[in-house]
């Protein structure tokens, strides 16, 4: 009997320790504010401590706003969780995952080589697409410059089209721009879709191997 594939969830460092950081910083901030009533004059160090505690509260809140698990995969495919939405990449929609490289150095991403743009683009929330394009603009610029031997073609390649067509579908607006970006990233890196990770390179490589193995099992119907 074939076994049921279990859901695998990956937690990132960005979501860890948010509650503790917020509570500790909030307690320190409260003590500092209460102590103001016994001070005749606010010292510089006291003001800086208040600011630091306030920043700690904000940082803790920002951590709590992040999804607990930034990535999961199950029998339906790979799901990326972002605080502004999520996308799903079905197993048949990509060929493999790996770590992209820049100047022969691994980057802080895991990435996917797509086989079917439509299965990805059709379910990609436009709001999330905008956030990803904004957050990964440095990655895109680096990839484009890597393909310019004289450094003069970057501005031309950075232009994103308003229309993009596959064999089955035509896209406009933000999804078209996202598709053009995927295509150009693919030409320079071999990957279309990127997920930022805070994992050690060894752990990121292991995660990619696990995803690739799970894909092969699903494609070959060895897991149901």
Image (cartoon, rainbow, N blue to C red):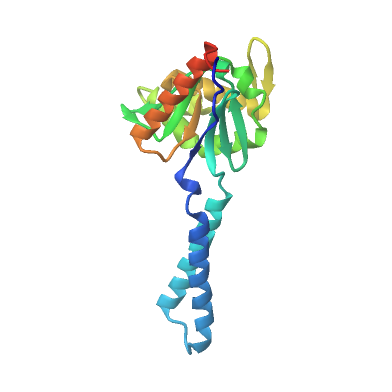
The relative height of residue 4 versus residue 13 in the rendered view (above or below) is above
Judge whether residue 71 can be spotted in this image: yes
- Please state the total of marks drawn on the protein image: 0
Which quarter shows the C terminus? Answer: top right
In percent of the image, x 35 and y 30: which residue is there?
Answer: 106
In percent of the image, x 56 and y 56: which residue is there?
Answer: 61
In percent of the image, x 54 and y 20: which residue is there?
Answer: 3
**Residue 58: x %, y % from top left:** 53, 59
Left-right relation of 198 to 174: left
Front residue of 202 and 111: 202
**Residue 140: x %, y % from top left:** 47, 30
Left-right relation of 103 to 195: left
Q: Residue most toward the left?
A: 104
Rendering quarter of residue 175: top right
In percent of the image, x 64 and y 29: which residue is there?
Answer: 124
Which quarter shows the N terminus? Answer: top right
């Amino acid at each position: 009997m074939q076994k049921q594939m279990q859901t695998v969830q990956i937690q990132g460092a960005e979501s860890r320790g948010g509650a503790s950081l917020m509570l500790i910083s909030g307690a320190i901030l409260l003590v500092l504010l209460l102590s103001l009533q016994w001070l005749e004059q606010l010292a510089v160090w006291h003001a800086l401590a208040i600011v630091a505690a306030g920043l700690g509260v904000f940082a803790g809140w920002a951590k709590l706003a992040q999804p607990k698990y930034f990535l999961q995969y199950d029998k339906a495919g790979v799901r990326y969780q972002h605080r502004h939405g999520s996308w799903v990449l079905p197993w048949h929609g990509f060929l493999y995952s790996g770590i992209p490289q820049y100047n022969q150095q691994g980057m802080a991403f895991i990435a996917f080589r797509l086989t079917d743009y439509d299965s990805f683009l059709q379910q990609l929330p436009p709001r999330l697409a905008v956030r990803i394009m904004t957050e990964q603009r440095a990655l895109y610029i680096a990839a484009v410059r890597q393909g310019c031997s004289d450094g003069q073609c970057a501005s031309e390649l950075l232009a994103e089209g308003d229309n993009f067509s596959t064999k089955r579908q035509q896209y406009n607006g933000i999804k078209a721009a996202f598709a053009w970006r995927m295509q150009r990233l693919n030409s320079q890196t071999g990957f279309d879709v990127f997920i930022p990770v805070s994992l050690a390179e060894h752990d990121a490589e292991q995660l990619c191997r696990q995803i690739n193995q799970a894909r092969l099992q699903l494609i070959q119907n060895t897991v149901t």
